[in-house]
Image: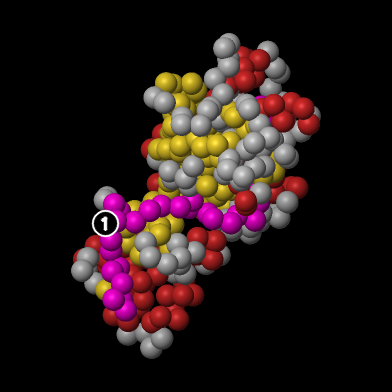
């Protein structure tokens, strides 16, 4: 499944992208449960197919299986409406927002691509180097990336992101995949001048819009191998990063296991797995992004993210 948060009129809602259409999972679930003869169909749908990603993920495997059934029902009943609201909409009629709007944790990993390390003459780290972003940084498909007044060096970092599906702590590498809901395209935007000046990442990577993710969350069952995905970053059509997730120093199960030894991971937590070489600050000449630029981030079949760069308005 490709899970999306979409916005028409009103608050963003959880849906599934099916071809060029979006199924409202909550409404489809309500219709399906009514068809099954459930007495409180609306309450049932709110319990297992809520309209928000983190609440949905908290339903675990049951919510995932019910979502698939709801999609099947919707495909057979495209014209259905609930309280004058369509169950199925044309994707072109709504806008997409980030698949996880307010993750409790955004955990990022530094120096985690072999080609990145080779480019800078670094030895790969024996253990992951992690740092955090905050929910204020989240932005989605076609949302503008705001270049804060504090920085003149706005950098890009194309990354594979994965989303936790179940609460977990001290998970073994062997069991790690059981706790991953899905994968998405991620960009760890950076103010390179500030990270250099501060000697750490909190300020330089923490600004609003500095965690671009989406356009959808591809569930784990549709990603047989997260370690064979092309990674590409383009600015104004020029390729500035190209690699493959087979270059990861610490792979997905290793990262989840390591992070779970530090934090209790919760449904909706996001882990960004690091970026390959070709960063703006490491090129000669440098390729920092400017207002008016268009940044495109693509990770295999996980979807293309497109974001314009704009100047902060005070």
The answer to whether residue 154 is magenta is: no
Figure check: 179 above or below 228: below
In this figure, which residue is indicated by the disc labeled 1?
A: 90
Q: Is residue 245 above or below residue 38?
A: above
The quarter holding residue 12 reads bottom left
Q: Is residue 259 left or right of residue 65?
A: right
Q: Residue furthest top?
A: 284
| Residue appearing at x 42%, y 38% in the figure | 306
Check if residue 83 falls in the magenta segment. Answer: yes
- Which image quadrant: the C terminus? top right
Q: Name the residue rendered at 52%, 47% in the picture.
A: 139
**Is residue 113 shown left or right of residue 202?**
left
Pick the residue in front: 85 or 67: 85
Quarter of the image holding residue 103?
bottom right
Q: Position of residue 286 (x, y in %)?
A: 58, 16
Q: Residue at x 50, y 60 (%)?
A: 53
Name which residue lies at 41% across and 26% down. Answer: 236
Q: Where is residue 8 in the image (x, y as percent from the top left)?
A: 37, 61
- The stretch in magenta equals 82-111
């Amino acid at each position: 499944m490709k899970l999306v948060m979409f916005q028409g009129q009103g608050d963003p809602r959880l849906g599934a992208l099916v071809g060029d259409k979006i199924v409202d999972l909550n409404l489809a679930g309500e219709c399906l449960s009514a068809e099954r003869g459930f007495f409180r169909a609306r309450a049932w749908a709110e319990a297992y197919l809520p309209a928000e990603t983190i609440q949905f993920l908290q339903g675990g495997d049951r919510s995932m299986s019910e979502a698939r059934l709801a999609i099947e029902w919707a495909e057979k009943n495209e014209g259905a409406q609930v309280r004058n609201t369509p169950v199925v909409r044309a994707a072109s009629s709504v806008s997409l927002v980030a698949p996880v709007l307010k993750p409790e944790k955004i955990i990022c990993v530094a120096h985690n691509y072999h080609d990145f390390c080779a480019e800078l003459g670094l030895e790969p780290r024996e253990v992951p180097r992690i740092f955090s972003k905050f929910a204020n940084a989240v932005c989605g498909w076609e949302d503008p990336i705001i270049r804060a007044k504090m920085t003149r060096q706005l950098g890009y970092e194309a990354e594979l992101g994965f989303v936790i599906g179940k609460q977990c702590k001290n998970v073994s590498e062997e069991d790690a995949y059981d706790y991953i809901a899905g994968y998405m395209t991620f960009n760890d935007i950076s103010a390179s001048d500030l990270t250099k000046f501060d000697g750490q990442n909190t300020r330089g990577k923490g600004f609003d819009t500095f965690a671009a993710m989406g356009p959808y969350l591809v569930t784990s069952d549709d990603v047989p191998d997260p370690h064979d995905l092309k990674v590409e970053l383009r600015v104004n059509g020029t390729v500035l990063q190209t690699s493959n997730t087979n270059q990861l120093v610490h792979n997905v199960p290793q990262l989840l296991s390591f992070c779970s030894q530090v934090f209790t991971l919760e449904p909706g937590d996001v882990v960004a797995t690091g970026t390959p070489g070709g960063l703006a600050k490491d090129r000669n000449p440098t390729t920092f992004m400017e207002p008016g630029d268009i940044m495109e981030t693509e990770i295999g079949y996980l979807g293309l993210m497109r974001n314009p760069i704009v100047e902060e308005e005070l």
